[in-house]
């Protein structure tokens, strides 16, 4: 589990660094412009600085405390066999970006600063939605929806294809319409031609 968390931290370390940089730049600008030295702007400068520091601390706590705790709690709820597979086969699982596709019917990925572990048979459908930054919405059998983020340097169609290769029973929707798979008869007709 240590290796999984280390990779998660490595993938998300830029978030607290960016928040720290923005906070330092803004507070530095407040000092340079004299906001803290004037009576009529001092309170506003303190409030904005406290807000920025709070956001930075929240990002650090979210990545380094809350996400690992939630992942450990989720792992404890899983059957022991699944836990062993996730940990022992982590290095051998097929990797596509920050996603791991296990041969044993399990997928692990990061989504909005969380580590998500799903069984393929839990996923009912997948639908890419570009209105949310080209993310893939996974509808689960328990009614929940989980978002699989697509990074700017990744191709959502390729991720869908990889997901379908591992779990062919997943229904794929494009713009709200179910994508039709060709039937065996269609395939035979095309092969005969």
Image (cartoon, grey):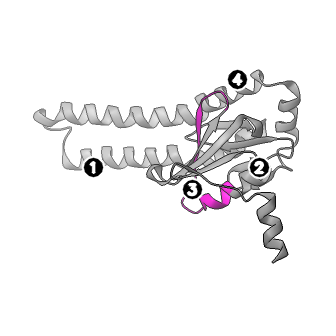
**Local crowd size for mark 1, using a 10 Å CA cut-off: few (<14), some (14–19), many (≥20):** few
Q: Mark 1 — residue?
A: 29
Query: How far across and how far down the image is residue 55, in percent?
Result: 41, 35
Q: Of the residues under marks 3 and 4, which one precedes in the sequence?
A: 4
Q: Earlier in the sequence, mark 1 or mark 2?
A: 1
What are the residue bounds of the magenta stretch?
Answer: 141-160
Label 3 to label 1: alpha-carbon separation? 32 Å
Give the mark toward the camera: 3 or 1: 3
The answer to whether 21 appears left or right of 97 in the picture is: left
| Mark closer to the observer (3, 2) | 2
Give the answer, above or below, for where 117 lies relative to 126. Answer: above
**Residue on which the image places disc 3:** 151
Q: State how far apart marks 1 and 2 are (Cα).
A: 55 Å
Which residue lies at the image location 82% right of the left edge and 44% below the top edge? 90
Residue on which the image places disc 2? 168
- Of residues 48 and 34, the one drawn nearer to the viewer in this rendering: 48
Horizontal and vertical percent position of residue 82: 84, 31
Give the secondary structure at mark 2: loop
Residue 6: in magenta span: no
- Residue 73 - label: 4
101 shown above or below 187: above
Quadrant placement of the N terminus: top right
Q: Helix, strand or loop at disc 3?
A: loop
Q: Residue at x 67, y 56 (%)?
A: 159
């Amino acid at each position: 589990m240590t290796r999984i968390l280390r990779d998660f931290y490595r993938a998300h370390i830029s978030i607290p660094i960016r928040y720290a940089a923005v906070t330092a730049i803004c507070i530095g600008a407040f000092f340079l412009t004299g906001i803290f030295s004037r009576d009529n702007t001092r309170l506003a400068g303190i409030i904005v600085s406290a807000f920025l520091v709070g956001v930075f601390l929240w990002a650090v706590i979210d990545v380094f405390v809350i996400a690992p705790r939630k992942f450990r709690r989720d792992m404890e709820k899983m059957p022991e066999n699944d836990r062993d597979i996730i940990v022992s086969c982590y290095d051998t699982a097929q990797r596509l970006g920050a996603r791991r596709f296990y041969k044993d019917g399990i997928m692990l990925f990061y989504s909005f600063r969380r580590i998500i572990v799903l069984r393929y048979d839990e996923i009912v459908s997948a639908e890419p939605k570009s209105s949310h930054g080209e993310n893939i919405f996974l509808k689960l059998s328990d009614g929940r929806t989980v978002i699989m983020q697509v990074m700017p340097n990744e191709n959502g169609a390729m991720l869908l294809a990889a997901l379908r290769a591992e779990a062919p029973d997943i229904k794929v929707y494009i713009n709200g319409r179910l994508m039709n798979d060709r039937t065996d008869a269609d395939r035979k007709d095309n092969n005969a031609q």
